[in-house]
Image (cartoon, helix red, strand yellow):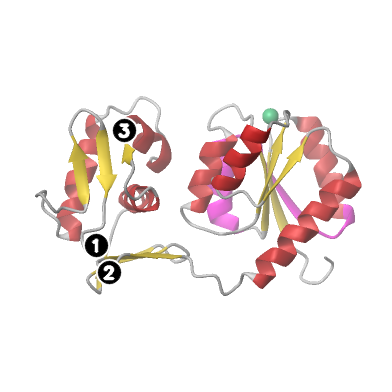
């Protein structure tokens, strides 16, 4: 682990656990940064691009699942989830949502370090992993946040990008306006669902997709929105 001085972002609201993690990790040569809330954690993640994230499930604003989803919209950086409860259901949920591993509190030092080393190794082996969405029409490069439609680059605002990335990652699933607000907006508090409607309209216009029977971003009346590939 000493090679490269890996950086770790800890997103955890409990001061005791943050301090414990910081002490352990710094002793092992990691560069440690901390966030005590989910939203700040996402912000710091985008600013500092840490090598590894340790993410608590129970956070005061966005919960760990929402934070994970936002991180995964942009990055495949390894994420170790922390939880107070060890249930098989949570574990499956975490791994399905793109967590790399799972640790139940209270945890021992040896176990923590072993998990971190394992996920860092896996990351090195996965360096060539393709982090793109491509259905023949829409291409999204998640690492660089670049979007092309039929080969033409499209310039999007950060919210429009996250909206599109979220819909594409949930291809075929209907997402409600409330879900999209939680997943795509920086500050979802107090936003009316009509914001989603207008953002979708702008997004379709920028992508050159007017709503029609085969529009890739489909309005499902009374439920929400769905991305579906046109080319299949
Ligand atoms: Ca917590």
| Label number found at residue 82 | none
Q: How far apart are the alpha carbons under marks 1 and 2?
A: 9 Å
Tell me the residue that label 1 is attached to.
Answer: 232
Percent of width and height locating residue 108:
89, 41
| Label number found at residue 176 | 3
- Quarter residue 231 falls in: bottom left
Q: Residue at x 18, y 52 (%)?
A: 204
Q: Are marks 2 and 3 in contact (CB under 8 Å)?
A: no
Q: How far apart are the alpha carbons under marks 3 and 1?
A: 24 Å
Percent of width and height locating residue 207:
20, 59
- Can residue 186 be seen at all in this image of the molecule? no
Q: Residues within 10 Å of mark 3 (few under 14, many from 20)?
A: some
| Label number found at residue 136 | 2
Q: How far apart are the alpha carbons under marks 2 and 3?
A: 26 Å
Inspect the magenta stretch and tell me whether residue 136 lies in it: no
Residue placed most toward the observer, 232 or 4: 232
Percent of width and height locating residue 14:
74, 30
**Quick check: 207 above or below 150?**
above
Highlighted magenta segment, given as a residue range: 27-49
Mark 1 or mark 2, which has the lower sequence index? 2
Asked if residue 219 lies left or right of residue 41, the reply is: left
Quadrant of the drawing holding the N terminus: bottom right
Q: Residues within 10 Å of mark 1 (few under 14, many from 20)?
A: few
Q: Residues within 10 Å of mark 2 (few under 14, many from 20)?
A: few
Ligand 1 occupies quarter: top right
């Amino acid at each position: 682990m000493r090679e490269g001085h890996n950086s770790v972002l800890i997103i955890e609201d409990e001061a005791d656990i943050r301090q414990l993690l910081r002490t352990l990790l710094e002793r092992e040569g990691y560069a440690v940064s901390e966030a005590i809330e989910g939203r700040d954690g996402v912000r710091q993640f985008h600013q500092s691009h840490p090598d590894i994230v340790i993410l608590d499930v129970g956070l005061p604003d966005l919960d760990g699942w929402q934070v994970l989803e936002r991180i995964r919209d942009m990055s495949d950086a390894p994420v170790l989830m922390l939880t107070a409860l060890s249930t098989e259901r949570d574990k499956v949920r975490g791994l399905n949502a793109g967590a790399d591993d799972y640790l139940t509190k209270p945890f021992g030092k040896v176990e923590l370090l072993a998990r971190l080393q394992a996920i860092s190794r896996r990351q090195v082996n996965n360096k060539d992993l393709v982090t793109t969405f491509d259905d023949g029409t829409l291409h999204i490069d998640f690492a660089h946040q670049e979007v092309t439609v039929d080969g033409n680059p499209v310039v999007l605002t950060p919210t429009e990008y996250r909206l599109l990335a979220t819909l594409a990652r949930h291809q075929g699933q209907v997402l409600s306006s409330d879900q999209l607000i939680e997943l795509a907006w920086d500050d979802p508090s107090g936003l009316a669902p009509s914001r989603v409607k207008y953002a979708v309209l702008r997004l379709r216009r920028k992508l050159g997709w007017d709503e029609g029977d085969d529009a890739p971003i489909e309005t499902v009346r009374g439920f929400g929105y769905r991305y579906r590939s046109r080319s299949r």
